[in-house]
Amino acid sequence: MPQLDLNTLVGERFSTLQLTMGINKRSNEYGLLNGMGLFSEKGIPERFVKIETRNQTLNIIPTSAVGTPAPAADDPDGREVIPPIPTFRHAKMHTLLAEDLQGVRAFGTDDMPEYPDMKMMEMLDKIQREHMQTREFLRWQALKGNVYDADGARLLYNVYTLMGESQQTIDWDLTDDTAVDPILDGNDELLDYLEDQALGETITGIVKFCSPGYWSAMMKNKAFREAYKYFSEQGGGEINPNRHLVRQFHYKGVTYIRHRGSCSYKKRDGTVVTHTFIPANEAIAVPMGTYECFKTFFGPAEFLETVNTEGLPLYVKPDVMKLDMGIELHSFSHQLNLVTKPRLVVKCTITP
């Protein structure tokens, strides 16, 4: 085999621009929220997000005589500028050693060496999966209100505090013997609340992400259980491979999704912290079809070539190690996952 020059390899095929553009083009829908596209994404040329809120209301326009000036609005929409919110840096270094490329044959062949490009693609896949898992974790944290760091101890921010709003909790009392349909009563309360609080936002549907415990409690209701049984028998309960073993069930105005997602973080002392996305015995209700409610902002990386450029979801920068022993791949993401109208995210509970 010819001698492999890592410096030439980095300069020609594995430059920062090529790796960054390549990894952002790769298809990866890691996790339920990422796959659903609930959060819209936007690149910004700085690492601070500036949010302006407006108390928008819709008013009926009265009639006016033809040829007269159009009446001006009585009062402009109230505006409030939130103090700049920083994006948060998530970075990690991976190494691709020269030894990893030494004498390794390609899978399925007897003597063909495994090309550096193939090894690089494997490494990029791992880098992307880790960053997508991180983004999924941060988005679930934003839905719950408190966004913690990976260790689960350091609070980065609270979306309700940032936006000056409070969390709404709605309880479904399935033990109320006086209620003709307790699930419908709870759903009506949820729909009425979201409709009243939309204030100019578009809502096309309601999704309730259910923990296993919440789902089990709902299944104890005879009407819900029989409706789901019929739904399943008609083929609606089949697992959708594109939604990570998720079953979606629409019942009385709300789409229910049972989800038991979690992720983990290994500390330096070897202990593992496991983060469950949905609190036990609870559900999270969110509106679908909104324009500005769920946002992910990406700031530029800290490279000279990215100064004053719009941020990308992920950057990868290669660097040849000392003595040409391998290549270091430094991955960076400056992001802020934010619920700009957290009042529209409803905590759902069930009376035991």
Image: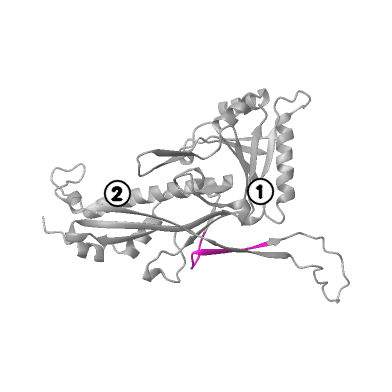
* The stretch drawn in magenta includes residue 27: no
Mark 2 — residue? Answer: 122
Would residue 196 appear left or right of 251 to someone viewing this image? right
Residue beneath the point at 52% across and 64% down: 48
* Residue 290 seen in the current view: no
Mark 1 — residue? Answer: 344
Q: Quadrant of the C terminus?
A: top right
Q: Distance of mark 1 from mark 2, alpha carbons? A: 40 Å
Number of numbered discs on residues: 2
3 or 322, which lies in front? Answer: 322
- Give the SS element for disc 1: helix
The image quadrant that residue 318 belongs to is: bottom left
Would residue 170 appear left or right of 261 to someone viewing this image? right
User: Please, is residue 103 above or below residue 240 in the view?
Assistant: below
Q: Which residues are magenta?
A: 42-53
- Give the SS element for disc 2: helix
Label 1 neighbour load within 10 Å: few <14, some 14-19, many 20+: many
263 or 203, which lies in front? Answer: 263
Label 2 neighbour load within 10 Å: few <14, some 14-19, many 20+: few
307 or 227, which lies in front? Answer: 307
User: Please, is residue 238 above or below residue 102 in the view?
Assistant: above
Which of disc 2 and disc 1 is earlier in sequence? 2
Residue beneath the point at 74% across and 25% down: 176
The spot of residue 349 in percent (x, y) is: 65, 34
The spot of residue 103 in percent (x, y) is: 14, 48
Name the amino acid, label 1.
Answer: Leu
Q: Main secondary structure of the magenta part?
A: strand
Residue beneath the point at 70% across and 65% down: 79
User: Please, is residue 228 above or below residue 96 in the view?
Assistant: above
